């Protein structure tokens, strides 16, 4: 078998899958986004830019998503990095596997059930009551952006920990020793050797968390009480309540575009930070 | 049997039932401990009448899927249906008719029975989503026992498309413990309190019909208005109130029970359930009016298990079963045979059977509200604001 034929053969399933499950649906979304809503809802073929002109009506959802998603990603990063660093560099090999498993354990339970648990914890009879018992006022947690942020960091943290852990784990210790031998204090070794070499993990982790967060709707729905609204929630509403498929399609297409632009900018800046290494940036 | 572990006392049974209802023990645990699971299957086997009735429908298959509302069916009754027919009931729960319609329009739901509210029926018929009911397959349905006011919306062009299930009102519930003395009596007060003293403690439905309808009542407009100017006023009120809301949700019982919320838009049956467990929770019909509704059993044209659908509807219409369900969900059934079987405390309940002057002000939801694009968009803008 010729090598080129073999390559084609092996790539065929993935190509067919992506064509049917990604490219074609995306084409449908774009076509629908120029259509009109039917009398009882749904889609009627047409060619109009009205849906795009009307996007301003969901500005609040864009604003929420574009502030809470990056902020959530950053929070995950700040919490995950030290944890991953400890796991990869400091934890004794005897405990490392156990600790790594503990990071994954939450995934064994559905995010839905875990979010319901947070409803109880953050609800009036949970944490606020406990705080009240200590003589402080009873704060309000549930159905606030704070509750949504707690749910996001809790749910997405493992996705950030693992790529960073992998990057840090394969770090060549001889480079750290060399840096130290040449007179660098630890903080400088970290900034000039460890951090740049782990940027690939940071990039992967941030992308995983950020891209999923941009489409998130469950956590805001459950912990935000329908008040903290993401684009994901706007989409669910347009398709499942208002039955305005064309407007929903326009919103979805715009979300894809916004995501592409943000991700490109982010990876570009990260690549510049790392001095143009290829493993950090995909583009 | 040598010991007594197989039996439990009536008192213990009721305690277990209560824990089960509150969700602190699982259904399986409840049926196991109380022996009900076993009892229903033994009963079904021992009562030839019960079994043969279901079997008379022929082999109805092993699965039936029902799309319905939260807190609307006693899971034990579905268990009994399974015991009697061998057909398991899958329940899909929704917060609004619009959500059901969206799923039905997208297709492929696999639903056999859809519990739909009066104002949706003409749209469902017009879109060819539901089909005419074959009344000969529902021997337990007695049209003459049902108030025509409630059964009427199920009949389109002289054909019966929907069988009445429950009737009720939409008002609001309050936790009277959080009020000193004077309690609100109107939708005007509901919204003013939401924006004022009860800021952060009030809940609005995630449902265009009632969220917008009851905002329209603030101005004294019709619950069903689709007048653009009146709808603009309602939207303004909703958006003003939004920062003051505790939540926008149709599943408000947990927040009322935990005390997180003090006031919520509320369906009569939820009010009955809440009031039963927490007497300090009261139900109020706004004196300006609001919604009166009837729910229906319908069968989608796409239903994959039609035989099972008829069997399930007929099973639930049987007056003793319907009364048992009513005890659970707390709505009136509109069926005089069932009313006669209910305990006095339910028949005399003001939540179920409000005073005539309050009742007269109420409106049935209008079909146009379901498809009106402005109402759909207002609810979406209210939620995304």
Image (cartoon, coloured by chain):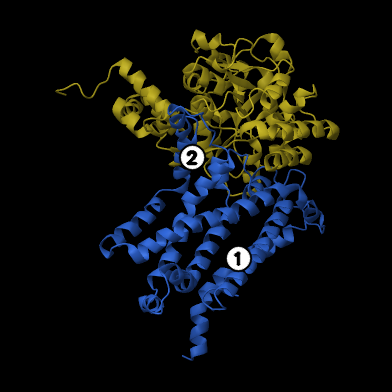
Chain colours: A blue, B yellow
Q: Residue at x 50, y 30 (%)?
A: A124
Q: Quadrant of residue B272?
A: top right
Residue A20 lies, in percent from the top left, at 59, 67
Indicate left or right for B68 with A102 as reference: right
Residue drawn at x 41%, y 53% is A107
Question: Can you say whether A74 is above or below B257 in the image?
Answer: below
Please tell me which residue lies in front, B3 or A176.
A176
Give the Cα separation between the discs numbered 2 and 1: 33 Å
Residue at image location 51% in from the left, 73% down from the top: A13
Q: Which mark is residue B349?
A: none
The spot of residue B309 in percent (x, y) is: 53, 36
Q: Is residue B84 above or below residue A65?
A: above
Query: Where is residue B51, by image quadrant?
Result: top left
Q: Mark 2 lies on which chain?
A: B
Indicate the secondary structure of the residue bearing disc 2. Answer: strand
> Residue placed farthest to the front in the image?
A183
Determine which quarter of the picture holds residue A189.
bottom left
Query: Is residue A25 something that shows in the picture?
Result: yes
Disc 2 marks which residue? B64
- Toward the left, the furthest residue is B2
Secondary element under disc 1, as helix, strand or loop, is helix
Q: State the residue in front, B284 or B226.
A: B284
> Which residue lies under the disc numbered 1?
A22
Q: In the visual, does B50 lie left or right of B250? A: left
The x, y position of residue A14, in whole percent, is: 52, 73
């Amino acid at each position: 078998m010729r090598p080129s034929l073999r390559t084609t053969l092996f790539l065929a399933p993935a190509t067919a899958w992506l064509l049917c499950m990604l490219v074609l649906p995306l084409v449908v979304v774009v076509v629908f986004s120029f259509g009109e809503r039917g009398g009882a809802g749904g889609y009627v073929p047409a060619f109009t830019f009205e849906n795009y002109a009307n996007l301003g009506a969901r500005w609040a959802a864009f604003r929420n998503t574009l502030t809470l998603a990056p902020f959530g990603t950053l929070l995950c990063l700040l919490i995950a990095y030290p944890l991953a660093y400890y796991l990869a560099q400091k934890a004794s090999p005897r405990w490392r596997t156990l600790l790594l498993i503990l990071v994954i354990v939450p995934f064994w339970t559905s995010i839905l059930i875990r979010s319901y648990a947070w409803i109880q914890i953050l609800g009036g009879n949970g944490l606020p009551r406990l705080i009240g018992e200590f003589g402080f006022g009873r704060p309000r947690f549930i159905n606030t952006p704070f509750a949504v942020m707690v749910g996001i960091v809790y749910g997405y943290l493992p996705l950030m920990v693992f790529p960073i852990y992998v990057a840090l784990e394969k770090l060549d210790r001889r480079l750290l020793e060399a840096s130290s031998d040449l007179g660098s204090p630890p903080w400088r070794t970290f900034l000039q050797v460890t951090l740049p070499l782990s940027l690939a993990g940071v990039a992967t982790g941030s992308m995983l968390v950020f891209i999923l967060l941009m489409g998130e709707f469950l956590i805001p729905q459950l912990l935000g009480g329908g008040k903290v609204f993401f684009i994901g929630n706007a989409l669910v509403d347009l398709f499942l309540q208002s039955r305005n498929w064309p407007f929903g399609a326009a919103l979805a297409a715009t979300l894809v575009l916004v995501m592409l632009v943000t991700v490109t900018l982010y990876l570009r800046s990260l690549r510049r930070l790392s001095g143009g290494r290829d493993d950090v940036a995909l583009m | 049997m040598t010991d007594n572990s197989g039996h439990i006392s009536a008192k213990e049974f009721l305690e277990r039932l209560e824990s089960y209802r509150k969700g602190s023990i699982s259904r399986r645990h409840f049926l196991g401990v109380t022996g009900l699971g076993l009892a229903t299957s033994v009963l079904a086997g021992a009562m030839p009448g019960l079994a043969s009735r279901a079997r008379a429908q022929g082999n109805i298959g092993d699965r039936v899927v029902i799309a319905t509302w939260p807190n609307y069916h006693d899971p034990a009754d579905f268990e009994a249906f399974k015991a009697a027919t061998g057909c398991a009931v899958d329940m899909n729960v929704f917060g609004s008719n619009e959500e059901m319609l969206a799923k039905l329009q997208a297709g492929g739901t696999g639903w056999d029975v859809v519990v739909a509210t009066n104002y949706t029926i003409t749209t469902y018929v017009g879109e060819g989503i539901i089909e005419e009911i074959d009344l000969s397959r529902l021997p337990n349905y007695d049209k003459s026992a049902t108030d025509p006011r409630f059964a009427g919306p199920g009949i389109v062009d002289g054909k019966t498309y929907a069988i009445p299930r429950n009737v009720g009102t939409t008002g609001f519930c309050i936790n009277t413990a959080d009020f000193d003395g004077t309690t609100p009596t109107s939708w005007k007060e509901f919204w003013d309190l939401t924006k004022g003293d009860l800021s952060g403690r009030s809940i609005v439905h995630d449902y265009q019909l009632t969220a917008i309808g009851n905002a329209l009542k603030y101005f004294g407009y019709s619950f069903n208005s689709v007048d653009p100017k009146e709808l603009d006023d309602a939207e303004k009120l909703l958006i003003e109130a939004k920062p003051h809301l505790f939540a926008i949700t149709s599943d408000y019982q947990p927040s009322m029970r935990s005390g997180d919320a003090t006031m919520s838009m509320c369906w009569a049956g939820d009010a009955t359930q809440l009031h039963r467990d927490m007497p300090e929770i009261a139900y109020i019909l706004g004196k300006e009016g609001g919604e009166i509704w009837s729910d229906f059993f319908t069968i989608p044209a796409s239903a994959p298990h039609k035989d099972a659908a008829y069997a399930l509807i007929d099973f639930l219409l049987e007056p003793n079963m319907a009364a048992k369900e009513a005890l659970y969900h707390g709505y009136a059934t509109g069926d005089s045979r069932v009313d006669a079987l209910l305990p006095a405390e339910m028949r005399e309940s003001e939540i179920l059977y409000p005073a005539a002057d309050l009742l007269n002000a109420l409106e049935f939801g209008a079909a146009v509200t379901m498809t009106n694009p402005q109402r759909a968009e207002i609810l979406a803008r209210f939620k995304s604001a």
